[in-house]
Image (spheres, grey):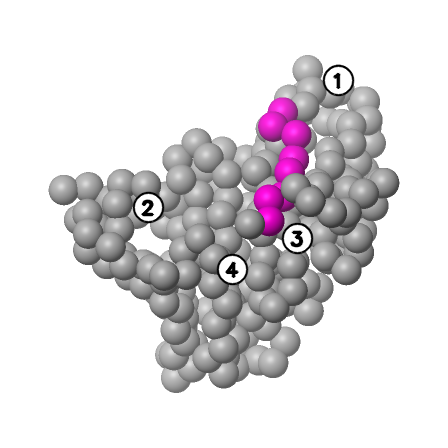
Amino acid sequence: QLQLQESGPGLVRPSETLSLTCTVSGGSIRSSRYYWGWIRQPPGKGLEWIGTIYYSGSTYYSPSLKSRVTISVDTSKNQFSLKLYSVTAADTAVYYCAMWGEKNCFDSWGQGTLVTVSS
Amino acid sequence: QTVVTQEPSFSVSPGGTVTLTCGLSSGSVSTSYYPSWYQQTPGQAPRTLISGTHTRSPGVPDRFSGSILGNKAALTITGAQADDESDFYCVLYLGSGISVFGGGTKLTVL
């Protein structure tokens, strides 16, 4: 059973970079069966897909965030990471990492971590 | 930009049946979009209910079923229970690694 856990600062200053890491346990991030994604949810609002990465490093980003996002993978640590640049208050959200699997859905989710953008 | 549409809210009586839908701003939803459905209660991570249009995730009661109805994906809850009151989201896979969430439906059971 795969488990995912987000980690990173809970507070980021406006115009700075939001950085989060997702640690995967119970399976290998190098598995050809999985893709790894980031999803966010502003307070009181719906879910928004940010992007997805394959262990080889291939990335896929939401068109609306593509200019400000980088997702990377560290197979040696079984982790993948999110960087969101030039953040504003509108980027305040709970950020989830998730596994996209063979069923073509987000099949396993982290518990989520709240990131607040404020000075 | 592609928008995935869901009813903002829906209400169902206990024991009743409700169908939530997931559409596209332009075009029809087919199985090629691999529609999936997620349930979320306040303060919790989403729970995967349905993948690939109609395949229930392990442990999901069979009162939840997925289908294509007309030009939309659909989630039907048969025999709604009080603890089904939650937010429901669909995801459509657009290809080339791109996924899009619908805006979500807030289901009230009363």
Q: Position of residue A66 (x, y in %)?
A: 41, 61
Q: Are marks 3 and 4 in contact (CB under 8 Å)?
A: no
Kind of residue at disc 4: Ala
Q: CA distance from mark 1 to mark 2?
A: 37 Å
**Mark 4 / mark 2, whichever is N-terminal:** 2
Which residue is depicted at the point 44% across and 49% down? A40
Q: Nearer the viewer, residue A62 or A31?
A: A62
The chain that hosts pointer 2 is A
Tag 2 residue: A91
Q: Circle 4: is it few (<14), some (14-19), or many (20+) Cα within 10 Å?
A: many
For residue B3, say whether it is visible: yes
| Foreground label between 3 and 4 | 3
Tag 3 residue: B92
Q: Is residue B12 left or right of residue A119?
A: right
Q: Circle 1: is it few (<14), some (14-19), or many (20+) Cα within 10 Å?
A: some
Q: Which residues are magenta?
A: B2-9
Quadrant location, the C terminus of chain A: top left
Kind of residue at disc 1: Ser
Tag 4 residue: A98
Q: Are marks 3 and 1 in contact (CB under 8 Å)?
A: no
Q: Nearer the viewer, residue A5 or B32?
A: B32
Q: Are marks 3 and 2 in contact (CB under 8 Å)?
A: no
Q: Position of residue B101 (x, y in %)?
A: 58, 47
The chain that hosts pointer 1 is B
Kind of residue at disc 2: Asp
Tag 1 residue: B13
Up-down: is A86 above or below B77?
Answer: below
